[in-house]
Image: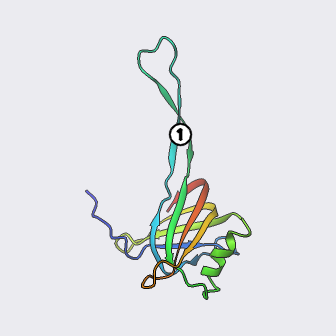
Amino acid sequence: MAATQPAAGTTLACDFTTPTTYVVIGLITSISGPEAEVGSVETTVLASTRKTYRYTIVDPGELSFEIDFDPTDSAVHAKLAALQDVPAMHSWQISYPCSGTPKKATVDGFLTKFAPDAGGVQENLTAAVTVKLTGPIVWS
């Protein structure tokens, strides 16, 4: 059985302007996804005694992440915020540390949500970000 892998050291990067030149997004506190899902279609007929199904194509789902938002970070955080105003396809890459040999998941997608949150007086300024994924998730 494989060893449990810690999440610490996981990074997320985006090719904001230059394809395949990834910029690591700093101050990430959590990453969820990609959450690919295989669809299904019911194939039950009148003579069936139980429901039957067939699979359909894969929906790569979404990638969501939370950051401690720094609006003065013009190199990365301000670029994330700007992606909401000018929708465009970008490549996103998650790098998992995996005991010194990183494993990567790379997929294309476009930002669908950038939601800053000032929280309470003792809270950090944060932002929730969601990316709609498209096409295959490439693992390397």
Q: Residue at x 64, y 71 (%)?
A: 20
Furthest-left residue in this view: 1
Q: Quadrant of residue 70?
A: bottom right
Q: Is residue 104 above or below residue 69?
A: above
Q: Residue at x 37, y 75 (%)?
A: 8
Furthest-top residue in this view: 47
Q: Is residue 57 left or right of residue 49?
A: right
Kind of residue sitting beneath label 1:
Gly
Q: Is residue 14 left or right of residue 125?
A: right
x and y percentages locating residue 121 in the rendered image: 45, 84
Please tell me how many numbered marks the rendered image carries: 1
x and y percentages locating residue 130 in the rendered image: 57, 64
x and y percentages locating residue 67 in the rendered image: 50, 76
Furthest-front residue in this view: 121
Q: Residue at x 49, y 28 (%)?
A: 53
Q: Which residue is the site of mark 1?
A: 39
Q: Nearer the viewer, residue 47 or 115?
A: 115
Q: Residue at x 56, y 47 (%)?
A: 59
